[in-house]
Amino acid sequence: MKKFSFFLLLLTLILIVVACGPESGQTQQEGGDKADEENGESGGGNGGGAYLVGIDTTYPPFEFQVGGEYTGIDIDIINAIAQSQDLDIELRPMDFVGIIPSLESGELDLAIAGMSITDERKEILDFSEPYFDAGLTLVVNAENTEVASLEDLEGRVVAVKNGTTGSKFARENQEEYGYRIADFEDSPSMFLDVANGHADVLLEDYPVIAYAITKRDLKLKTVGERLTNDQYGIAVLKGQNGDLLEKVNAGLQELRDSGEYDEILKKYIDESGL
């Protein structure tokens, strides 16, 4: 009788443990998920973590690497803005062509990548106040004496970097000037193709190519007048992160007022005589 009572008690205890076990496990999992969210693990600036900033590190003097460290005009500007506005940021390097899609998908909160402000981009992006006056120029092999303007491009090959205003300009004017287009994913490959004579000319923002020619033996030269009057801006997805963009503009104004903006430009451009 005592043995039967013992087994009955044991069975009752097992049933209680089984009944309570899954509910306790579920509560623990839910608690863990909530803790992750509160600690900012959901990603991006909106989740309580760092704002994710898209950059293109193949674009000196605006963005490049030295000894594994990111540097350049854009890097110094966004870091200075973050410091003045108390923003926690995390730089995310990628090909330029992937930056806007990453903003659209929510993988990035912000982008600074020598990005020209255009009407087409303004349909999907909101831009800060302009922070740099750029403009496209024609670039040829240093020994080329046959190309000096768009009128000289008929039957020639024009190299462009995907996703840039140079690429857009080339396609918009291809029929009028009768050239062929060669597409590249990064600036160094495009520069090399023209230097080696595979393509006849490339389209690039003047400050970028002028800096590159000054700093490195690229065997290239700029020709003619600037083709456009582009301005660079810092971008967020249209209708999103409006408060962040306000802080970016406030930070830019502080940099200008304090003189730090001019010092950043001198560091990368004026010292090269550009």
Image (spheres, helix red, strand yellow):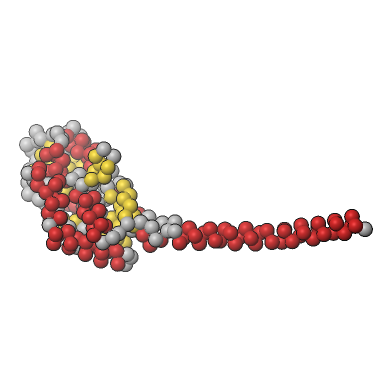
Q: Quadrant of the C terminus?
A: top left
In the image: residue 7, left or right of residue 176: right
Task: Work out whether residue 32 can be spotted.
Answer: yes
Can you name the residue that lies furthest to the right here?
A: 1
Residue at 21% from the left image edge and 51% from the top image edge: 76
In the image: residue 21, left or right of residue 164: right
Residue at 20% from the left image edge and 42% from the top image edge: 159
Residue 183: quadrant of the picture: top left
x and y, in percent, of residue 176 in the image: 15, 51
Residue at 27% from the left image edge and 42% from the top image edge: 69
How many discs appear?
0
Q: Is residue 136 above or below residue 38?
A: above
Viewer-closest of 257 and 269: 257
Viewer-closest of 113 and 179: 113
Residue 124: quadrant of the picture: bottom left
x and y, in percent, of residue 145 in the image: 6, 36
Can you name the residue that lies furthest to the front here?
A: 2
Residue at 28% from the left image edge and 39% from the top image edge: 68
x and y, in percent, of residue 1 in the image: 93, 58
x and y, in percent, of residue 249 in the image: 22, 63
Task: Work out whether residue 97 can be spotted.
Answer: no
Viewer-closest of 249 and 32: 32
Residue 15: quadrant of the picture: bottom right
